Amino acid sequence: AVWSASDAPVLAYMDVDLSTDLRALLPLIAPIVSGHSDLAIGTRLARSSRVVRGPKRELISRSYNLILRGALSASFSDAQCGFKAIRNEVAHDLLPLVEDDNWFFDTELLVIAQRVGLRIHEVPVDWVDDPDSRVDVVATAREDLRGVVRLLRSFAGGRIPVARLRAELGRDAEVPSTVPGVPRGMFGQLLRFGGVGVLSTLAYFVLYLGMRDLTGPQAANLVALLVTAIANTAANRRVTFGVRGSDGALRHHAGGLIAFLVGLGLTSGSLWVLHQVSPDPNRGIEVAILVLANAISTLVRFLALRQLMAHRR
């Protein structure tokens, strides 16, 4: 409520117990004032942070942030450190979407900010635990876990307008394409996709050539293509398109399966035609035809996966 009523360009807060050393205040707000970042948070979990607290709170804090990374793909290191700042206009856009008004509030704000493409700056802090803290750790942890589940449902059900906010607020909207007509980021994706593709192709031919004499060309092609297609989709989700966690994984692998079927049709059809023309073809010609067929199916795979990843949220 205080943030919503403020007209200050930068909004910040810290815990009333003054556990965080105030010398970190200027480093906290500097990236926001400069326009470099949209939010800034103190972190007690950076290597250069100096923290004094008991093992129980240390374990709970690290476990909670691990849950956030696993369940919500959080990229920030310390959601609960009571030392945060935000640009005013960002706060006014995001606060109406934050349902929690208790301890989960800042986690919810950070997760939404990350999902819409805002830049979150982290500042290592010096932090000393307050031995007289009245916080009920067990009750707080229980409420936080409920908040995680609620957020997952909100994102899955589309109740948080991520796409609209990303277009309006996200850093992606500020960087135009460097080449007219070419979507921003495609060149980088193509390079990463190509790297994954080279490794997948090598694995395919190792499997194919290793099984060909035992199973015949068609069966060897089927097995090699299926194994590498599954691995290729998983690798491209993470490496090429930066998707982590299980969100959309089933849909992505289904798209990869369709691309696999296209590739299977191309490679199997090519092998069939080749063996109709020459029952015992030269192994080099066979490999060359498979390379061409795989190149075409690779293009289909890239376009299909890129379309799927673009609509992953």
Image (tube, helix red, strand yellow):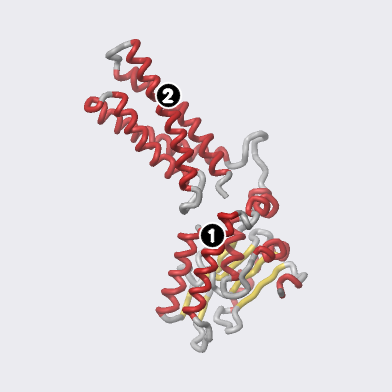
Secondary structure beneath dot 1 equals helix
**Foreground residue among 222 and 50:** 222
The residue that mark 2 highlights is 266
Q: CA distance from mark 2 to mark 1?
A: 40 Å
Q: Going by the picture, which residue comes out furthest to the left? A: 214
Q: Going by the picture, which residue comes out furthest to the top? A: 277
The residue under label 2 is which amino acid type? Leu
Circle on res. 181: none
Labels 2, 1: front one: 1
**Foreground residue among 79 and 35:** 79
Residue drawn where x is 30% and y is 29% of the image: 208
Circle on res. 152: 1
Q: Tell me the quarter of the picture where residue 56 sits.
A: bottom left
**What is the x, y in percent for residue 105?**
60, 70
Residue drawn where x is 52% and y is 65% of the image: 148
Q: Going by the picture, which residue comes out furthest to the right? A: 7
**What is the x, y in percent for residue 17?**
58, 84
Q: Tag 1: Cα neighbours inside 10 Å, few (<14), some, or many (≥20)? A: some
Q: How many marks?
A: 2
The residue under label 1 is which amino acid type? Leu
Residue 28 lies left or right of residue 217; in this view the side is: right
Q: Is residue 138 above or below residue 174?
A: below
